Image: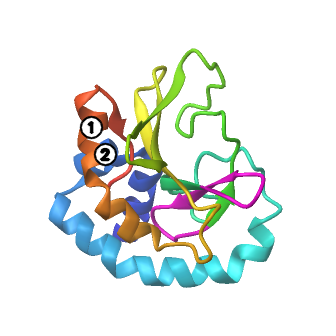
């Protein structure tokens, strides 16, 4: 029952998770179930790859993404699930959280010396997501490490008035 409540909250975003229970308890639950969720996602990948590509939440477990990356020569965008680590294709010019495609509301910023990392934001819903251009990498970097190493971008986005919809 506790796992089910956690997954329901994870689908609703970070604010709902924090309202549901103590943050420390939720972190422990997340750490406890994440390995099994990742294993489950690996077994479900062939089926989920045919899922709708406009899914704003994970096609495997329903949790929200915590980062995205641009890869291959086409610079195709992939979202990374915060719970099961599944990765799915998603349009580059579309808000991950509210789905808007209005380019007047979508934008991004970078830091001068790190053009391969950007923060995509949406003025419609106020959300943001870090996006890593890994198209030139030989081996994709581990996204949890990249997310943690770039916390300064989270602070910059929050200072600009945007909200992190999923926990780091």
User: Dot 2 surroundings within 10 Å: few (below 14), some, or many (20 or more)?
Assistant: many
Q: Give the position of the C terminus as an image quadrant.
A: bottom left
Camera-side residue of 60 and 110: 110
Say whether residue 42 is left or right of residue 37. Answer: right
- Residue at screen point 54% across, 54% down: 68
Q: Is residue 13 above or below residue 3?
A: above
Q: Position of residue 167 (x, y in %)?
A: 32, 54
Which residue in the protein does label 2 denote?
153
User: Dot 1 surroundings within 10 Å: few (below 14), some, or many (20 or more)?
Assistant: some
Q: Is residue 120 above or below residue 161?
A: below
Q: Is residue 48 above or below residue 89?
A: below
Do the numbered discs 2 and 1 sit on residues whose CB atoms are within 8 Å?
yes
- Residue at screen point 64% across, 81% down: 42
Q: Position of residue 62 (x, y in %)?
A: 56, 57
| Residue lying at the far top of the rendered structure | 104
Read off the magenta span: 70-86
| Residue lying at the far front of the rendered structure | 113
**Residue 125 within the segment the image draws in magenta:** no
Q: Give the position of the N terminus as an image quadrant.
A: bottom left
Which residue in the protein does label 1 denote?
156
Label 1 secondary element: helix
| Residue lying at the far right of the rendered structure | 50
Distance Cα–Cα, label 2 vs label 1 = 5 Å
Q: Position of residue 73 (x, y in %)?
A: 76, 57
Say whether residue 17 is left or right of residue 133. Answer: left
Say whether residue 45 is left or right of residue 149. Answer: right
- Residue at screen point 53% across, 79% down: 38
Camera-side residue of 67 and 23: 67
Camera-side residue of 110 and 19: 110
**Residue 71 within the segment the image draws in magenta:** yes
- Residue at screen point 83% across, 62% down: 50
């Amino acid at each position: 029952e506790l796992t089910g409540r956690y997954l329901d909250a994870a689908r609703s975003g970070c604010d709902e998770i924090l309202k549901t229970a103590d943050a420390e308890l939720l972190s422990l639950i997340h750490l406890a179930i994440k390995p099994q969720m990742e294993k489950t996602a690996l077994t479900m990948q062939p089926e989920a790859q045919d899922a709708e590509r406009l899914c704003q939440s994970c096609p495997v477990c329903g949790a929200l993404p915590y980062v995205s990356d641009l890869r291959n020569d086409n610079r195709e965008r992939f979202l990374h699930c915060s719970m099961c680590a599944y990765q799915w294709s998603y349009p580059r010019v579309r808000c991950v959280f509210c789905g808007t495609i209005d380019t007047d509301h979508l934008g991004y910023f970078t830091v001068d010396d790190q053009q391969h990392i950007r923060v995509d934001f949406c003025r419609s819903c106020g959300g943001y997501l870090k996006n890593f251009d890994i198209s030139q990498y030989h081996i994709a970097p581990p996204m949890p490490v990249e997310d943690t190493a770039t916390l300064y971008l989270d602070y910059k986005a929050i200072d600009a008035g945007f909200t992190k919809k999923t926990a780091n």
